[in-house]
Image (cartoon, rainbow, N blue to C red):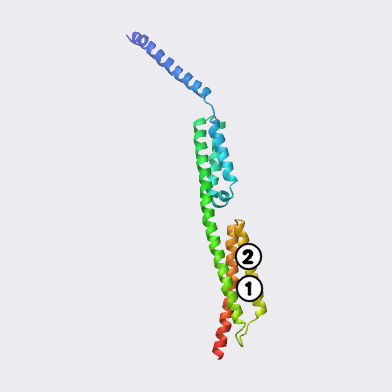
């Protein structure tokens, strides 16, 4: 009976083995026929290159740009290993991150320009006000101030403000902001000296 059962089972076993072999062969055929996602990979490389050449993306969206470059490297690694579906997914990720870096960089640059313009306007206004205060101080009798030194400080503040405006025109917003603030600091120092000297004159009256 046992021998009979084993003989009865053999056709089914052979059938299963044949089916498994067919699946394996089919899988190998599919793998052999699979092709790298050339178009997607080229699009990804182009997108990352555009982001790398975008000054705003580089300056203001460095982290997002790094993610795009990382996805591109992983895409190439997967393609070399013939894992084309994974490579295709990383290609899409690289494109998405690169486009986001460009968009985020553009938005951040616009905000930076607005801030730089605001800082420059404040520096210009302070330059006008301090200039008037300095001229008025020169008319005050018995006021004790080194006007030659203050005129030099004022000229330095004026030149620094001009440099801030040039930096703004060149889209160098951080430098423009820095120079505007420096100029305002110089002018504030002049205002403080004038205020202190004027207070001393008032007390002597």
Instruction: Look at the image and tell me in which quarter the C terminus lies.
Output: bottom right
Q: Observer-nearest residue: 201 or 74? A: 201
The residue positioned 65% from the left and 71% from the top of the image is 155
Secondary element under disc 2, as helix, strand or loop, is helix
Q: Observer-nearest residue: 30 or 41? A: 41
Instruction: Look at the image and tell me in which quarter the N terminus lies.
Output: top left
Using residue 156 as the reference point, say whether residue 89 is left or right of it: left
Question: Does 160 appear above or below 4?
Answer: below
Q: Please tell me the numbered disc located at residue 202.
A: none
Please tell me in which quadrant of the rendered image residue 161 appears.
bottom right
Q: Residue furthest bottom?
A: 205
Secondary element under disc 1, as helix, strand or loop, is helix
Q: Which residue is mark 2?
A: 162
Earlier in the chain: of badge 2 and badge 1, it is 1
Is residue 188 among what the camera can see? no
Q: Observer-nearest residue: 50 or 80? A: 50
Q: Residues within 10 Å of mark 2 (few under 14, many from 20)?
A: some
Please tell me in which quadrant of the rendered image residue 148 appears.
bottom right
Q: Observer-nearest residue: 180 or 62? A: 180
Question: Does 85 appear above or below 164?
Answer: above
- Whole-percent x, y for residue 168 in the image: 59, 59
- Whole-percent x, y for residue 114 in the image: 52, 59
Q: Please tell me the numbered disc located at residue 154.
A: 1
- Whole-percent x, y for residue 202 in the image: 55, 87
Q: Residues within 10 Å of mark 1 (few under 14, many from 20)?
A: many
Q: CA distance from mark 2 to mark 1?
A: 12 Å
């Amino acid at each position: 009976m046992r021998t009979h059962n084993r003989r009865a089972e053999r056709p089914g076993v052979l059938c299963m083995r044949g089916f498994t072999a067919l699946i394996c062969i089919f899988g190998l055929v599919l793998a052999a026929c699979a092709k790298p996602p050339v178009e997607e990979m080229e699009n990804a490389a182009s997108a990352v290159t555009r982001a790398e050449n975008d000054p705003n993306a580089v300056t203001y969206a460095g982290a997002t740009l790094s993610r795009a470059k990382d996805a591109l490297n992983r895409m190439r690694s997967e393609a070399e290993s013939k894992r084309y579906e994974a490579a295709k997914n990383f290609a899409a990720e690289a494109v998405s991150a690169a486009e986001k870096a460009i968009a985020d960089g553009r938005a951040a640059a616009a905000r930076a320009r607005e801030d730089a313009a605001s800082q420059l306007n404040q520096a210009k206004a302070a330059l006008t006000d301090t200039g008037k205060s300095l001229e008025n101080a020169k008319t005050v009798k018995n006021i004790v101030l080194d006007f030659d030194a203050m005129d030099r400080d004022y000229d330095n503040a004026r030149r620094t403000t001009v440099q801030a405006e040039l930096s703004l025109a060149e889209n160098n917003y951080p430098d423009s902001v820095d120079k505007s603030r420096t100029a305002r600091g110089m002018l504030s120092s002049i205002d403080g000296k004038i205020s202190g000297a004027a207070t001393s004159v008032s007390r002597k009256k």
